[in-house]
Amino acid sequence: MKKLGIVVCVLTLVVGCQRDVYRFTEGGVYGTTYHVSYRSDTDYDAEIRQEMERVNQSLSMFNKNSVISKWNRGESDQVDSLFIAMYTKAKEVNQVTGGAFDITVAPLVNVWGFGFKNEKLPSAEKVDSLLRYVGMDKVQLDGDRVIKQVEGIQMDASSIAKGQGVDLVAEFFDRNGVHDYMIEIGGEVRVRGESNKQRPWHIGIDKPIDDATAANRELQLVLALREGALATSGNYRRFYVVDGKKYSHTINPKTGYPVQQDILGASVYAPTCMEADAYATAFMVLGTKEAKRIVEENPHIDACFIYQNEQGEREVWISDRLKTLIYEE
Ligand code: ADP
Ligand code: MG
């Protein structure tokens, strides 16, 4: 009996110790970097990479063999489960935002992107002519097929796929009994539980400073989070300058032009990172006034907007629930 007692004791000690191990892994994915911290007695670094890689197979615009690339070329209208999850969420955010979020902007993204690279912007006629390929009402999901109602429609999942990658890792952890984690890919984050400091995860929101290299970072505020995802869109880091004029990489699907709104940075806090990522992009299109209305009407969405008021001064708006999550030293 005594012996068993000792064995149990030692076992508890070993298991207890192992459960306290926080692991950290980092690397490059989707043209950016990732950092993941998690508390587990098992090393899941390879599985984490595998989960992220699934998005590349399905939704990468750079992978010629991805499901979305084949769909865009019109080779197949059949899609996989990741595509369907992305599409369904994109459709929902498209409806809630009155069309501001729209993944069928792909032809416009291409023509503007090409223009930026060559310092030759598209003509008004060219932009107008592409609008007939834009609109999520021109595509329909039917079982595992997505049907184009207008030949030539293409999709660009860049604004939501990174968030989906974060969610896949989170879901992997949830399935495998990992209850404390922080997953970050290119600034989009999802957390659960506590950090190795035995407190909620501290997640910073950057001050929008025009700086494409991200060499100078200053924090606007820090959140203390035990659950949920935070994604940020901002034209202060990714923009193009042609003839001294600044262009954003977010496009207004209604006009076909890069957005010029008052928001410098939009951070969205939501249950999933896919959702946070999509809304952050949509809010850049909508501007502060409309974006605030959507946040206030959708209780599961919170946000922090850093914007320029009519006097050209910088202001910060934070939704009520998010204010309660601000960490103050
Ligand atoms: P950010 O971090 O600024 O949100 P994302 O990568 O999440 O950047 O989203 C921007 C990308 O989304 C663009 O590069 C383009 O591919 C695509 N995009 C541009 N405008 C829209 C839009 N209105 N709706 C959905 N996707 C868009
Ligand atoms: Mg986004």
Image (cartoon, rainbow, N blue to C red):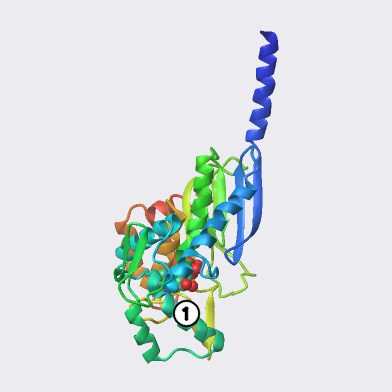
Where is residue 163 shown, x and y percent of the image? Answer: 48, 59
Image vertical order of residue 227 relative to residue 303, above or below = above
Viewer-proximal residue among 207 and 79:
79
Left or right? Give the position of 26 relative to 130: right
Q: Position of residue 235 (x, y in %)?
A: 49, 74
The N terminus lies in which quarter of the figure? top right
Residue 12 falls in image quadrant: top right
Neighbour class for label 1 at 10 Å: few (<14), some, many (≥20)?
Answer: few
Element type at mark 1: helix
Whether residue 16 is visible to the viewer of this picture, yes or no, is: yes
- Which residue lies at the image location 59% right of the left edge and 50% below the top edge? 48
Viewer-proximal residue among 309 and 74: 74
Question: Looking at the picture, does residue 200 appear above or below residue 234?
Answer: above
Q: Quadrant of residue 323?
A: bottom left
- Confirm whether residue 268 shows in the render: no
How far from the left and from the top, in percent, is residue 197?
62, 42
Q: Residue furthest top?
A: 1
Q: Is residue 238 left or right of residue 109?
A: right
Report the label total.
Answer: 1
For this orientation, the residue located farthest to the front is: 75
Pick the front one: 95 or 308? 95
Residue 189: give x, y in percent of width and height.
Answer: 52, 55
Quick check: is the Cβ at mark 1 less than 8 Å away from ligand 1? no
In the image, what residue type sits under mark 1?
Answer: Asn
Residue with the mark numbered 1: 110
